[in-house]
């Protein structure tokens, strides 16, 4: 059963589907500005097939989708950042309008052309890189922001990343001391098979409340060391989630410039994290 499709249309659909599945063509980046005839041809063919499925003509869908792809890339090239920041829904709406207009000009229906172009535009969006924040007009590229934060505040020791969640730690000396602590504790334990990672970093005050410099989340009350950028919270546990006790961690800490706050020891916190800080005014 082919629902009125010609053999050539069926073959074209199969060819395009196989090519997309095999990633033969790059139709996956709606914010890119490079225009290739291959991409235009693939999207145009998809548009033609979609138009036939809607009861329209292959040519109208072909022109609408192809012209939309080319026009969208040209728009992006004129203002790459602005186009990317419009978000997927606005980019799809823009291309749907172009497709509908192109279809009407070539003798087809505006609605069919808009649907065809919108489908082609949606195919090219990287939806996993965006999250709606507040409204459909605001998009946040979580992937790039997280990677930038992780790179900026990375702490590595013995090829192990000690700040995998990218907590804000703007004090270079503090990050160096964390790396030294990890090495000291590894020697103390005679193994690196234990949990050790940053779980808290810099904070700032706003309207009398403390907020995380990492993601802006409300913390409430905070000690001054975190606000100065001199403190770090650390998860230091055995693999079975038991706390590595203070009497084992303390000798490793004593061989760094970090100090304990006796009012902020692991037993003071529900997650039993270690709070360590540099002395006020510390200069490396």
Image: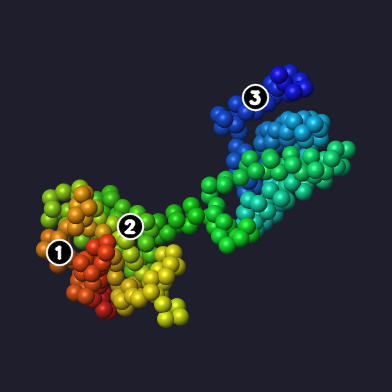
Q: Residues within 10 Å of mark 3 (few under 14, many from 20)?
A: few
Q: Quadrant of the N terminus?
A: top right
Viewer-side residue, 21 vs 283: 21
Q: Position of residue 260 (x, y in %)?
A: 20, 71
| Mark number displayed over residue 15 | 3
Tell me the colour scheme of the image: rainbow
Does residue 44 appear left or right of residue 84 in this picture? right
**Spatial distance from mark 3 to mark 2, Cα to Cα?**
46 Å
Q: Residues within 10 Å of mark 1 (few under 14, many from 20)?
A: some
The residue to which callout 1 is attached is: 246
Task: Look at 73% across and 51% down and name the residue there.
Answer: 94
Judged by depth in the image, the label closer to the viewer, 3 or 1, is 1
Quadrant of the image occupied by residue 62:
top right
Q: Quadrant of the C terminus?
A: bottom left
**Spatial distance from mark 3 to mark 1, Cα to Cα?**
65 Å
Sooner in the amino-acid sequence: mark 3 or mark 2: 3
Q: Secondary structure at mark 1?
A: helix
| Whether residue 81 can be seen here | no
Q: Residues within 10 Å of mark 2 (few under 14, many from 20)?
A: many
**Spatial distance from mark 2 to mark 1, Cα to Cα?**
21 Å
Sooner in the amino-acid sequence: mark 3 or mark 1: 3
| Mark number displayed over residue 187 | none
Viewer-side residue, 89 vs 21: 89
Q: Secondary structure at mark 2?
A: loop
Task: Look at 42% across and 81% down and name the residue there.
Answer: 208
The residue to which callout 2 is attached is: 163
Q: Position of residue 241 (x, y in %)?
A: 22, 53
Evaluate if marks 3 and 1 touch, with contact meaning CB atoms under 8 Å apart.
no
Q: Position of residue 70 (x, y in %)?
A: 72, 43
Task: Look at 84% across and 40% down and name the residue there.
Answer: 109
Q: Is residue 10 above or below residue 107?
A: above
């Amino acid at each position: 059963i082919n629902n009125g499709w010609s053999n050539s249309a069926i073959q074209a659909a199969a060819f395009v589907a196989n090519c997309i599945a095999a990633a033969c063509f790059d139709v996956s980046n709606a914010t890119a500005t490079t225009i290739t005839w291959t991409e235009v041809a693939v999207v145009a063919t998809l548009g033609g097939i979609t138009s036939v499925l809607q009861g329209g003509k292959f040519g109208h869908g072909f022109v609408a989708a192809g012209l939309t792809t080319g026009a969208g890339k040209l728009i992006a090239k004129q203002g790459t950042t602005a186009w990317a920041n419009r978000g997927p829904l606005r980019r799809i709406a823009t291309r749907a309008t172009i497709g509908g207009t192109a279809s009407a000009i070539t003798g087809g229906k505006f609605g069919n052309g808009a649907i065809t172009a919108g489908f082609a535009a949606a195919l090219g969006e990287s939806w996993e890189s965006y999250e709606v924040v507040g409204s459909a007009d605001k998009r946040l590229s979580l992937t790039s922001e997280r990677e930038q934060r992780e790179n900026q505040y990375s702490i590595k020791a013995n090829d192990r990343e000690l700040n995998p969640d990218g907590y804000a730690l703007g004090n270079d000396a503090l990050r160096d001391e964390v790396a030294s602590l990890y090495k000291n504790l590894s020697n103390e334990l005679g193994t690196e098979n234990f949990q050790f990672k940053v779980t808290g970093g810099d904070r700032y005050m706003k309207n009398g409340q403390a907020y995380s410099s990492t993601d802006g989340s409300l913390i409430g009350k905070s000690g001054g060391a975190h606000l100065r950028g001199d403190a770090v919270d650390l998860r230091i546990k055995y693999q079975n989630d038991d706390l590595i006790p203070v009497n084992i961690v303390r000798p490793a800490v004593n061989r760094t410039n970090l100090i304990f706050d006796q009012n902020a020891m692991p037993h003071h916190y529900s997650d039993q994290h270690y709070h360590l800080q540099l002395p006020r005014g510390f200069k490396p």
